Amino acid sequence: MQMHKPRHAFTALLAAALIAGCGQEAPPPAPKADAPQTPEVVTVKIGSASPLTGPQAHIGIDIRNGVQLGIEDLNAKGIEIGGRKVRFELVAEDDEANPTKATTVAQKLVDTKVAAVVGHFNSGASIPASKIYADAGVPQISPASTNPDYTLKGFSTTFRVVAHDGQQGPTLARFALNTLKSKNIAVIDDSTAYGQGLADNFEATVKSLGGKIVAREHTTDKDTDFKAILTKIKGRKPDLIMFGGIDPQAGPMIKQMKDLGINAGFIGGDGMQTPNFIKLAGDAAEGAMASIPGLPKDQMPGGKAFLEKYKAKFNQEVELFAPMGYDAVFVFAEAMKRAGSTEPAKFLPEIGKTDYQGVIGPIAFDGKGDLRSAPITIYVVKGGRWEPLEIIKPDGGGEPAGAETPAADQAPK
């Protein structure tokens, strides 16, 4: 009898195991205490607004490219804000350099829930759009708008990373009178907030310093035939013509000056200091001068590295304001990090406290949202290229930038 006991015991154990297996599932294995947790990734949208079509598209695309490069570099760093990993995303819109379209674009960006906007290029676009952003509490940094009114609306959301025309216009005027020794100056503007604002500041300073304005004419940012205006001006015998406007008008204008035999110098602002101006003007561009907010690009603290990176990415040279667009992205990101939040209401107060060393140099804002330190560079077309001529410091002092200063009567011939 004892020989059968093990078989009975085995059978009983097997039956109990089968019953238990039919009645419940085995518990899942306990998770390892050191299993890696996937961090939460927050997507933060950064808007870019500039003309991406039309005659000023080359400048608007340049800005957008700068913003895109900034976003890509931020994402490569893998930054965290408020303990959460952040991925930045570009939302680019075309404002067509049109004030009405700019407000539509601004509302679209607000509705898309962007955290901040880099834009616009044109002052005439930035100024009306700024109210849309202000009403929504969305911070805006313009990389290019220079009309003083842009930051004089009292909006806490409004900033820029370039000198304004209250600085640029007088700088051009003093250069015309003191360096070029101009005696009879004609002024033309394109009737935009940018062009007319720059020309107004230039004219007012010339008059206040005892200079003579022999003519003041207006065109538009759509015109390309200026012979009637130039013929009228020719009779006033100016030794310098100042143009407030953008390169699609400045290029044909200086070419038509040559055709009419107007032997005067030609000077303008940042809107014409582009490779496109030289392309449009051809040989007539030689000797033309223009100011631009900021240092020469290759003399900016991060300029050379940025120019190389931009060329490698987009297979083209920087047009104008790409470095400013790039830096604006980092100003936003740094404000977010200080606030520990990507919510506009929380990081907006930090933007005004910015103390950032960017590609363009030190960035800090005054109470209006303007740059505290805003140098201006005068350029001249020499040998078919824009060459830096003089750097005007924020305190009004200047220093040569390498090129030989042309005399006032050295007009394009």
Image (cartoon, helix red, strand yellow):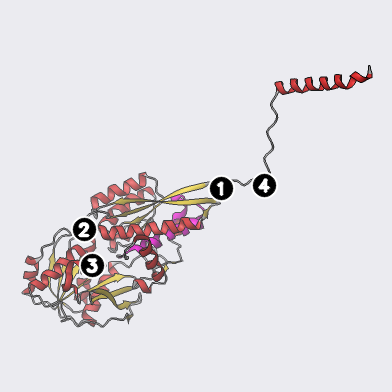
Residue 224 rendering spot, x and y as whole percentages:
13, 62
Query: Residue 18 versus residue 237: which sits nearer the camera?
Result: 18
Q: Secondary structure at mark 2?
A: loop
Q: At 52% across and 53% down in the image, what residue appears?
A: 81
Cβ atoms at labels 1 and 2 below 8 Å apart? no
Q: Amino acid at mark 2?
A: Pro
Q: Amino acid at mark 3?
A: Met
Residue 192 rendering spot, x and y as whole percentages:
20, 60
How dense is the environment of label 3, judged by Cα within 10 Å: few (below 14), some, or many (20 and up)?
many
How dense is the environment of label 2, judged by Cα within 10 Å: few (below 14), some, or many (20 and up)?
some
Q: Secondary structure at mark 1?
A: loop
Query: Residue 164 versus residue 36: which sits nearer the camera?
Result: 36
Query: Residue 388 versus residue 342: which sits nearer the camera?
Result: 388
Mark 1 vs 4, N-terminal side = 4
Mark 3 vs 2, N-terminal side = 2
Q: Horizontal placement of 375 versus 347: left or right?
A: left
- The residue beneath circle 1 is 39
What separation in Å lies between label 4 and label 3 (alpha carbons)?
Answer: 61 Å
What separation in Å lies between label 3 and label 1 (alpha carbons)?
Answer: 48 Å
Residue 292 rendering spot, x and y as whole percentages:
29, 70
Q: Which mark is residue 34?
A: 4
Q: Which mark is residue 384?
A: none
Mark 3 vs 1, N-terminal side = 1
Mark 1 vs 2, N-terminal side = 1
Q: At 35% across and 74% down in the image, what residue appears?
A: 394
Q: Nearer the viewer, mark 4 or mark 3?
A: 4
Q: Which mark is residue 55?
A: 2
Q: Which mark is residue 272?
A: 3
Q: Quadrant of the C terminus?
A: bottom left
Cβ atoms at labels 2 and 4 below 8 Å apart? no
